[in-house]
Every structure is written in C-alpha cells, then in structure tokens.
Image: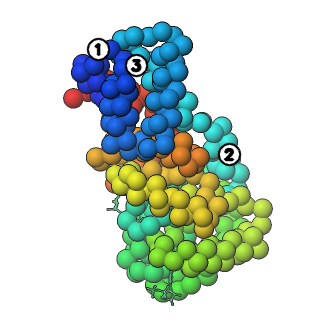
Amino acid sequence: MGFFGKLFSSLADAFSQIDDEFYDELEEQMILGDVGVETSERIIEELRTKVFDRRIMRTSDCRELLKEAVREQMQPDEHAYDFENERSVVLVIGVNGVGKTTSVGKMAAMYKNEGKRVLMCAADTFRAAAIEQLTEWSRRAGVELIAQSEGSDPAAVVFDAARAAASRRTDILLVDTAGRLHNKKNLMEELAKIDRILAKEYEGARRETLIVLDATTGQNAMSQARQFMEAADVTGVILTKMDGSAKGGIAVAIQAELGLPVKFVGTGEKLADLKRFDPQEYVETLFAADEA
Ligand code: GDP
Ligand code: GDP
Ligand code: MG
C-alpha cells in the first residue's frame, strides 16, 4: 500500500521545482495506478489551484496539498451502513471470479460476530460447485444457508430464503448470485424477478445491492461497475483482492467517477479478511510512507 506516498517521494526526488513536467508525470503515474483519467485530471487541477493560491514552489512542500486534493474526491457517505441497522436484504452481484461467494461468507461471519441474526441464500444455482462453496462458508461462519439444487430458478431460492427470513425475524439476509453478465437484459429480468419476490415475500425489508469488484483488474472493474449500474440499482461496492497487486488507486476512481461508495474491502481468502471501508482513513494509508 502507500501508493501515493511512494509515488510522491520518487517524484519529489526527481523534480525539485513544481512545473508542468512535474504535473504531467504525477498525472501519468496516477493513471497507471488505477486512479482513472478523469479523476487524475481533476486531482491535478485541484492541486494546481492549491499550489498557486498558497504560493508553493517546491515539490516537497506540496505533499499535503496533494493529499487534500485526493481526499476531496472521496465523498464519505454517512448513510453507507444504515442498512445494517435495519431489517435488510443484501444482494451481492458481479461477474464471475471477483469474489462474490467469498464476500458473502465473510459478511455472514462478520454480522454474526456482531450479534445479528443472519441468513444466507445460494441464488447462484448455475453450477453445483457454487452451492457447495457457499455451503462450506455457511459451515465456517456458523450461519444457516437456504439453497436448492443446481439448475433451479434463482428466484425460487430467493423466495424460500425470503419466507425463511420473514418467519425467523432475520436481521440481514445475504444473497449470493450468479456472475452472468453476457446479456444485460437477462440480468435485468432476473433482478427484477428477485425484486418482485422480495417485495411480496419480505415486505418492508431494506434493499442493499452491492457490486463486487476485483481491485487487481483496474479499468475492467470500472467498466463492469458501469454495466451493472445500468441494469441494477447498485448501492455500493465490495472491493476485493486488495491484498494482492492492486495499487489502490481504484478505490479513488470508484468513488469519484462512479459516485458509488466503496463499503467493504476484501483483503484475503479467509473468514476475517473483510473490513468496512473508511475513505478518509484510506487516504492516510495511500499516503503512508512505504514499509518496504
Ligand atoms: P465469485 O465467482 O464472484 O463468487 O468469486 P469467489 O468468491 O468464488 O472467489 C474467486 C476467487 O477469488 C477465490 O479463489 C477466492 O478465494 C478469491 N478471493 C475472493 N476474495 C478475495 C480477496 O479479498 N483476496 C484474495 N486474495 N482472494 C480473494
Ligand atoms: P447461454 O445459452 O449460456 O447464454 O445461457 P442462457 O441464458 O440461454 O441460459 C441457459 C439456461 O440456464 C436457461 O435454462 C436459463 O434459465 C438458465 N440460466 C441462465 N442464467 C442463469 C443463472 O444465473 N442461474 C440459473 N440458475 N440459471 C440460469
Ligand atoms: Mg460465486
């Protein structure tokens, strides 16, 4: 981690004066770090204004200003976790392999440890392996799972889960879904069907739709998010694999370019490797001096 910290140190070494060349190099490196073209441009523009207003000349003196400019892109959302304190259904969506099933397992364990009544639903019925995988997470987390056999209608499983959740006074129902975005129309239809069932069978439950994005896939993750946002009322992001090669700039791009709050971050393959995301704290880690 510490992407900006590292970047800034190396640029401050290479450029003593703040000039166009410095700004260009900074912007280019930010784009390479998955911050995104638009967001990088905006940050540089902000930085230029701040540097001018405060009459800063030396690169080493503008570190705090850059940090401010990045922080301003993060838009913390004080209602991001409101759903946790209401009876809610969390629908976890995203393409194959990003970490949906794993994240559902981790969330189940987290909420259970926090004393909530949790139920999981295996609405990815497309492959038997997906159901087995979630069954294993259910065992690890000690949280009950509603599932049917492979090939059954995902909406039918959601129906069962909604009934069970309503009768058991569940706090949070976590729904794992299949990662099939080959066809936006299919996805929209499937989600609409699930919506209708939840509205009818689980009245009054708040809906939270989280898209899972693999942080190591950079701009690909951004375009996946855009596609899902066209098909569903996405309310937040679970950013996975932040323990890997991800530079971390993607979290800034998601907030700034998509206007979506990153709500959770996955940092490994184990049960406890999921954290709530704090944008301001995150900027601090991005600027932290590198441990290496
Ligand atoms: P799904 O197809 O979206 O349901 O993805 P899975 O939950 O099956 O995860 C796909 C792969 O990513 C598995 O090997 C997971 O162990 C791995 N994975 C998921 N989340 C993380 C994470 O935060 N960090 C790491 N390193 N691996 C993860
Ligand atoms: P394709 O031909 O591979 O594009 O798949 P289709 O969308 O035509 O679906 C093939 C079959 O799988 C149909 O019977 C669908 O109802 C079913 N199906 C498609 N997507 C899903 C899904 O996400 N979950 C489940 N359980 N079934 C699905
Ligand atoms: Mg899965």
Q: Position of residue 51 (x, y in %)?
A: 47, 16
Helix, strand or loop at disc 1?
Answer: loop
Q: Is residue 270 visible?
A: no
Disc 2 residue type (three-letter): Asp
Q: Nearer the viewer, mark 1 or mark 2?
A: 1
Q: Is residue 184 visible?
A: yes
Q: Residue at x 49, y 43 (%)?
A: 38
- Above or below, 70 against 218 in this view is above
Q: Which residue is mark 3?
A: 63
- Between 158 and 11, the one lying in front of the other is 11
Q: Secondary structure at mark 2?
A: helix
Say whether residue 166 is left or right of residue 245. right
Image mark for residue 16: 1
* Structural distance between the alpha carbons of marks 3 and 1: 13 Å
Q: Is residue 287 positioned above or below 198 on the image?
A: above
Which amino acid does the dot numbered 1 rest on? Ser
Residue 254 coordinates in the image, percent (x, y): 50, 47
Locate residue 289, reporting x and y percent.
31, 23
Q: Secondary structure at mark 3?
A: helix
Vertical side of 204 occupied by 266: above or below:
above
Q: Is residue 67 left or right of residue 206?
A: left
Q: Which residue is mark 2?
A: 82
- Going from N to C along the chain, the mark reached first, 1 or 2, is 1
